[in-house]
Amino acid sequence: MTTIAPYRAPQRAGRDGFWQLVHAEWTKFRTVRGWLVAVVLAVVLIDVLGLFLVDVGTNQCNGPCVPAVPTGPGGEAVLDSFYFVHQSLSADGSLTVRVTSLTGKYQPQGGPIGPHTTRGLTRFVVPWAKAGIIIDQSTKQGSAYAAMMVTGQHGVRMQYNYTGDIAGLPGRVSPSSPRWLRLTRSGDTITGYDSADGSHWTKVGTVRLAGLPAAVQAGLFATSPVYFQGNFPSYAQSGGGTSPSTATGVFDHVSLRGGPATGTWSGQFTGANARLDSMPGVGFQHADGRFTITGTGDIAPIVGGGANVNFVTGTIADHLVAVIFGLVVLVVIGAMFVTAEYRRGMMRVTLAASPRRGRVLAAKSVVIGLVCFVLGLPAAAIAVIVGAMISRNHGVYVLPVSWLTELQVIVGIAALLAVAGVLAVAVGTILRRSVLAVATVIAVFVLPYILGDTSVVAPDVSEWMFRVTPIAAFAVQQSVPAYPQVMGQYGPPEYFALPPWAGLLVLCGYAAVALTVACSLLRTRDA
Amino acid sequence: MEATIEVAGLHKRFGPALALDGMSFVVRPGKVTGFVGPNGAGKSTTMRVILGLDAPDAGRALVSGQPYARLRHPLSHIGALLDASALQPGRTARNHLLWLAHSQGLTARRVDEVIEQAGLMPAARRKAGGYSLGMRQRLGIAAAMLGDPPILMLDEPFNGLDPEGIVWMRGFLRALAGEGRAILVSSHLMSELQDTADHLVVVGRGRVIADTGVAELIAAASGDRVTVRTRARAEAMTALTHGGATVAATDRDTLTIAGLPAEQVVALLTEAGVAFSEVAAHRATLEEAYMEMTREAVEFRAQSVEEATP
């Protein structure tokens, strides 16, 4: 009997590192044409549906659709509309007043009213009606300012540069409970004080208005924003509307120190684009040191939904509405990338080629995650950039955001798709059967998405859907902040309960839990 | 490290069914080891355990002295074909091999080599879903050969092959064993392993019934019998019986003689003047040997069934 020498391979064995495995999984993915077609279709869906089949609303306007909208020092779109009784102040100084009354009117039925409308007006001070004192860089729209004011329901506030808001004395103002307000200017630094009696003063806040010129406008103002009727914030579904309003402030003990001031008070309505700059009674009276000023409008950022302006506003994320459809296709492919292997028994070939099973799961996740991210990035970029252009062509005013915010939305959507894909891979691994896994991943995203629609459920249910379910990640779409000091239509798809990063983190949490379970099952189960 | 498969005391239960019941054997290099037994004997389960796909309840399986899970680039240690249909139908054969190659850090050049080796050349760029079972077997062989491993383990590779394919497969396996590789080939049909296997591991009901060389097995089953072909059957029987042999008529002109060596058979027939056309040592087929060997197991099984019946 002859002895045969054991076989020695003539060639050196290759490496079997993690990246070899990723390479293998990528080869698997790209060599099934159906999958490639489906993922490309997914992103085409996002753009085609998002850009062309979605009605962003058309401005019902005469003349130029999108007016010149001022932006504040922070770059955000602002309303800068109020009745201003002012004089020039060209040195350091201080302005002190006593406010004895804040009253208001609004139109409960909504609808158009003009300067001579009286019927239907009801006495009511809207919550964010404002009357007080202001130091304004100029009377130009969007100029820097700092102001002390009494409000309808939110006590004394110090507000500045449209987005800043600091609370002062609480409670409503009345002749028996007046409020004293003071602003002092030192260079470009403004400090606000309040007092209930004119002798004991409390500092509310100090702000620096960078680049404040020597000559500024100082004076008294009143303004009153559009009021949301119905059970805010669900007014949208209760069929309510928005109502214009006016506010009237009564001031005395007016004292402007420091100089040289011009000495005479002049009144003017400043601003444009407010829902009503022609409400009845707007103007001021001055007698015996007593000023009565009636104004309308707001000094505040413009918020999404366009509720506080007379033109249609939109955000850069308006054309991302079809992301959910693309996401559904991508998670189906993500789940099938795993379950197809189980169905054919190919998982055994895969696990024989790589007995370290956790790595197999990781490699599959990396491939699906990267595919979703790389395809999602241009899809989101097109939907955001081209979408904003289409909105503008439809006469919609797209709320301006910084390029960083734009990047956050685009990268955020790509990341959302990537993490959703990884979650689908994990679910596919856990469930192993295509039908079951596909049904699960669709349900996990689509059900909360439907339940997140306020036209289907109550707003608080909707809020919880976007807080605790995987769709919380859609918060990456939020491009403009919500302001507690501005009444607005704060809900999806413009506004979310969680900040963008936190929403994405919720989805990451789901993916991490699913991956952990999948990994442990994959390791312990017979293949 | 010698290229071997060692299986020791494997037990595995799937629910109420006992799949492996103390399976133990060793596969050595330079030989084709046939892994034979009826369907359900535990062959495929054993192979899955060897590849680390199924975890045994007890016992262990080693590939070249290591548990499979500890092998680096495992496909260069052992190539396996468990299920020829385990592939994505929409992927071409070449791409199927390509992802496997990439998982081991191998290149497309190696893929083209094994495609040629397995005779898949003309069909390699067609979708594997359209392959016949025979073509899939060849694709499976190509996949097993990717890492140029010293050990090959093939589950029912003859299934679905046409006669030409069976001849090719036999030659291929013989050649690989000739290179010093260890080959384990399972089959539920002993005849498939005729002229292919050097060694047999015969299994039934989750354990090894016989672990023996093919030559010894056939010799044992053949005994020292002699076959005589003659027209004068009756005369020949008389002459040989008188000479002290046990004679059985196995065909119209064939006798099988036990108890006498061939030389004496020739002498007795010549002495009696009986004409004959052939005298030869009887050679059992592998199938006969297998049936003989498994008869006991079958009888045992029948007996236990009787006992169990009240």
Image: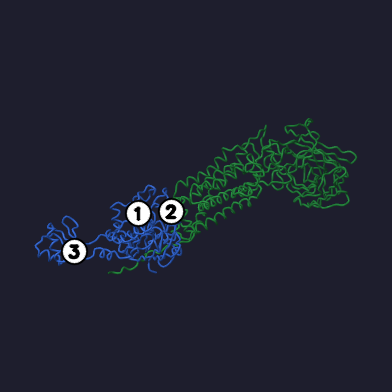
Answer yes or no: do the residues labelled 3 and 2 have beta carbons within 8 Å?
no
> Which amino acid does the dot numbered 3 rest on?
Thr
Question: In the image, residue A389 lies at what x, y percent?
Answer: 60, 40
Disc 3 element: strand
Mark 3, mark 2: which one is toward the viewer? Answer: 3
Q: Report in which chain the residue with disc 3 lies.
A: B
Mark 3, mark 1: which one is toward the viewer? Answer: 3
In the foreground, A482 or A279 = A482
Q: Quadrant of residue B107?
A: bottom left
Disc 1 element: helix
- Mark 3 or mark 1, which has the lower sequence index? 1
- C-alpha span from label 3 to label 1: 49 Å
- C-alpha span from label 3 to label 2: 57 Å
> Which amino acid does the dot numbered 1 rest on?
Arg
- C-alpha span from label 1 to label 2: 16 Å
Question: In the image, residue A439 lies at what x, y percent?
Answer: 52, 46
Q: Residues within 10 Å of mark 1 (few under 14, many from 20)?
A: many
Q: Is A135 positioned to the left or the right of A41 in the image? A: right
Q: Are marks 1 and 2 on the same chain?
A: no
Q: Report in which chain the residue with disc 1 lies.
A: B
Question: Looking at the picture, does residue A112 appear above or below residue A435?
Answer: above
Q: Which residue is mark 3?
A: B246
Task: Give the image's coloring scheme.
Answer: by chain
Q: Report in which chain the residue with disc 2 lies.
A: A
Q: Which residue is mark 1?
A: B138
Q: Is A419 positioned to the left or the right of B284 in the image? A: right
Figure chain in blue: B
Answer yes or no: do the residues labelled 3 and 1 have beta carbons within 8 Å?
no
Q: Which residue is mark 2?
A: A346
Q: Is A356 positioned to the left or the right of A181 in the image? A: left
Q: Residues within 10 Å of mark 2 (few under 14, many from 20)?
A: many
